Image: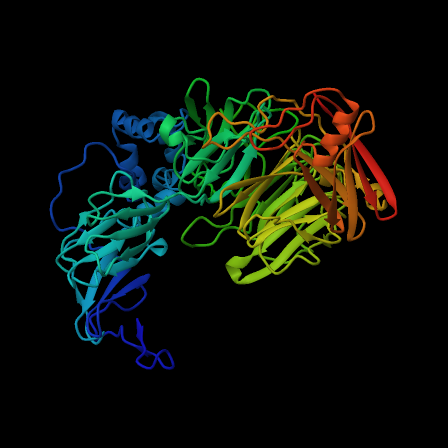
Amino acid sequence: IYKSTDAGTTWTKISTPSSGFPTGEGVGRIGLAVFDDNIVYAVHDNQFRREKSKEKKEKQSGLTKDDFKSLSKEQFLKLNDKELNEFLKTNNFHEKYRAANVKQMVRSNAVQPADLALYLEDANSMLFDTPVIGAEVYRSNDGGKTWSKQNEDYIDDLFYSYGYYFAQITVDPNNVDAIYLAGVPIIASKDGGKTYTSINGDNVHADHHALWINPKLPGHLINGNDGGVNTSYDDGKNWFKNNSPTVGQFYAIAVDNEKPYNIYGGLQDNGVWMGPHNAEENSEWQQTGQYPWKSILGGDGMQVEIDDRNANIVYTGYQFGNYFRIDLEKDQRNYIQPKHELGEAPYRFNWQTPILLSPHNQDILYMGSNKMHRSLNKGDTWETISADLTQGGKQGNVAYGTLTTISESTYKFGLLYTGSDDGLIQRTDNGGGSWITVSNNLPQNLWVSRVIASKHNENRVYATLNGYRSDDFTPYVFVSDDKGSTWKNISNNIPTSAVNVVVEDPENENLLFVGTDNGLYVSLDRGTTWQSFQNGMPYVAIHDLVIQQDAKHLVVGTHGRSIYTANIAALQNLTSEVQNKALHVYALENIKHSSRWGNSWSTWSKPRTPGLDITFYSDSDDVYEAKIISSDDIVVSETEIIADKGLNVLSYDVAFSKIGKMNYLKKHKTVLKQADNGSTYLPKGTYTVEIKGNGTVEKATFDIE
């Protein structure tokens, strides 16, 4: 802990050995709360190991994982077979690992007794099982000169060894003894940190990171957590949610081929959700009780794959490779994580473990740990088809030296690429029979955020690298036309920002999209140049992109502002031929006539109104005349539009202009009824859109059916 008394010009370290605050290798993350000049609180994630309890505990019935860490070979072989089998079954060891088999493996020195404990240790268990002191609270009454520990007992079930993620302490500005600790739950103390109670109410998500205490209204708290924002007016006895802005943090998204298609997404600490892409964003569901989006799994939501033969079969999971095959129709889940062999080191699974259904056969599923795994039967059984495809792993807070991305070429079964969090891209041409490293000519030791085999060229592959974890915010986007033997940097004019994803359009090989930590970019020339593609979307981290081919939608998963969709049909057709024209008007879709256009059932409700978006390309900034002409050459509406170079949209309300209506009635002896909103809408028929300017005229027709 450092202190400054000159507004930060100079600093003095005050957590010294004589101060009473912990020092040395075990000091973890520290959070501070200042009450006044003298009284300061600190919450400390103490990483020193706990002393083993001297109290005699009742002996646990049955064997435990830790028992095997100290057993000799001779002691292990003397274990009761029934008791050993009970342990193996309870801990979900594979069927082939039963007492007789395992004892034979130990007898022949194929495995050691400690391997049974190792078999059960993964990234999650290694965190939870660490016997550290954990959260503790210190108080200084003399401006930090001396500190005294407040809590007499361990503050358990607060950090769960995720202390690096928390360590927030807050003190009530009106009560020096009222403090709050933010962790997995949020807990409060009214005696200066000696004892605590949970104020994690029914309506409050876990994982707390911010707390504001109203200095003028006792009991008024605003709490920021992994589920959004909650407010209390009675000091945490009751809370309500303040999640009216759309603030979802999506790691990954996917789409199916249903009509309407559904979007699936894994969210940071909010599970996996799915919903129809055309669900309207409104709060009516709070009255009807029918929210269009459904939660299908908890935890930190991860990658999603959907069987394209049956959209009820979904593969997804939570952190560190805990994946399931879910049958939505039957409401069934099957746990499908590959398991290492007894005696092997446990697999290292990335926080966001990559999975992929083979485009050649939807029974074949790939999953990456530090190795590549393949199932030929939907995840029921697995074979490992590689050695370690990373640089071997390093110690850290979470698993490292893991695969982060997988892609299989649509041209050839078994032509696979993997990318790792430590900078390696590997390729196999024979379904894992042999692998070669293809990233030696790329920047080294970065996080491979995406590798994508092209759908337009068997030899083409795209890759993005991400260096923000090393304070490197350079945009790294590369393409290879020889399966990774050589690479070309195509990041060019993308502004400085870490790149998370690249996606190639399935129809137009020149059309690429890139998602960075600061926004979305599009290239019309296969990466030679890039343009911002925000168009009203906030500048927020883009973590995933997917294209729904039938709808021609780009679906954008953001880490902060949920999901956006964009119709990219016009971009897909923005070919070099179109760009070489002075003006190009895109084909129009027909619309259905309705007698309710412009009318409403009540004076107080908004009328339903139609619309037609007329998209056109201009090779320069210009002013165009636009006319809507009936099948018998009457100009029913006209306007001017100031166009930018590029794509433009003229939104037409499908109504007559005053002059257009007059001219139409001169020729047609009919009644044109004015709607409640004052507009007169076009009757059924065929109409032509004519856009003139830039030395040319272009036309397109549409029907009102």
In the displayed structure, 585 sits above or below 444; it is above
The answer, for residue 289, to whether it is visible in the render is no
Q: Nearer the viewer, residue 406 or 576?
A: 576
Task: State which quadrant residue 23 falls in.
Answer: bottom left
The reply, left or right, for residue 480 in relation to residue 609 is: right
Q: Position of residue 354 (x, y in %)?
A: 53, 39
Residue at 46% from the left image edge and 18% from the top image edge: 329
Q: How many marks?
A: 0
Asked which quadrant contains residue 441, the reply is: bottom right
Instruction: Check the picture and name the quadrant holding the N terminus.
Output: bottom left
Looking at the image, which is closer to me, 665 or 430?
A: 665
Give x and y (percent) for residue 169. 26, 59
| Picture layout, residue 141 above or below residue 274 | below
- Residue shown at the point (47%, 31%) measured from the top left: 605
Relative image position of residue 231 (x, y in whole percent)? 29, 48
Q: Extreme top residue here?
A: 330
- 495 sits left or right of 235 in the view: right
